[in-house]
Amino acid sequence: MTARPYVLLSAAMSVDGYLDDTSPERLRLSNAPDFDRVDQVRAESDAILIGANTMRRDNPRLLVNSEERRAQRVADGKPEYPLKVTVTKSGDLSADLKFWHFGGDKLVITVDEAVEKVRATLGDLADVVSVGPDLDWGLVLDELGRRGIRQLMVEGGGTIHTQLMAQNLADEVHLAIAPLLVGQPEAARFLGAADYPGGSTARMKVLEVRAIDDVVLIRYAPKERG
């Protein structure tokens, strides 16, 4: 059986747990040194995954920005950029999004009902594969494992983070906590309501706590609960 990738969730959030506010502009939560740290984690990963909602809202390029890190990937026998992955159940994607037009290879994982719709929309911009009638995260990880993905970096959004945590599929979590308060109930949060493994008393192992200027990085091991 092909091994599933090591799943690393990465998010920047406010002290009160928000990924963004409700303004039209993206809320800048991280600082420059932390963005550089994220770039390093991207460079160390075989694939980076975001949800279709995050792609539509933020329109990210999702790249390794450092030329030196990209060169090191090539020297190590890897593609210059990690595989960029998105998941969609609806198939509602636009070919105009930046995601498709920068970096290396792209993969869309969807369901049977939407697979032809996505292929018709994107053409040769991405490889498109279905995991069956439902978007099963175990099957998503199996598909990535078959493609040689050993480390998967997940950059959101909150729905995907919640699903992976609730299904106990996240191996590591990187939380960059910004010294901001959002306080807007309609804004996106890092995690939503779910039946999390072990319930509300299960304490995750802390791997690291580090100040990065005014941001605090906390690394957790979600599967190691006491």
Image (cartoon, rainbow, N blue to C red):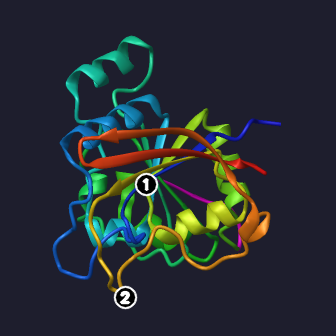
In the picture, which quadrant includes the N terminus?
A: top right
Q: Earlier in the sequence, mark 2 or mark 1?
A: 1
Quick check: is 130 in the magenta stretch? yes
Residue 186 tag number: 2
Give left or right: position of 193 versus 87: right
Relative horizontal placement of residue 202, taking residue 149 as reference (left or right): right
| Residue type of the residue flagged with mark 1 | Glu
Residue 81 coordinates in the image, percent (x, y): 35, 33
Q: Which residue is mark 1?
A: 155
Tell me where residue 68 sits by quadrant.
Answer: top left
Q: Secondary structure at mark 1?
A: loop
- Would you place residue 103 above or below residue 28 in this image? above
Q: Tell me, yes or no, whether the two marked residues, 2 and 1, touch with CB atoms within 8 Å.
A: no
123 in relation to 103, above or below = below
Residue for point 56% across, 36% down = 151
Q: Percent x, y for residue 19?
A: 36, 67
The span picked out in magenta is 127-133
Tell me the amino acid under the disc marked 2. Answer: Glu
**Measuring 23% from the left and 35% from the top, which residue is drawn there?**
65
Vertical relation: 1 (above or below) 164:
above
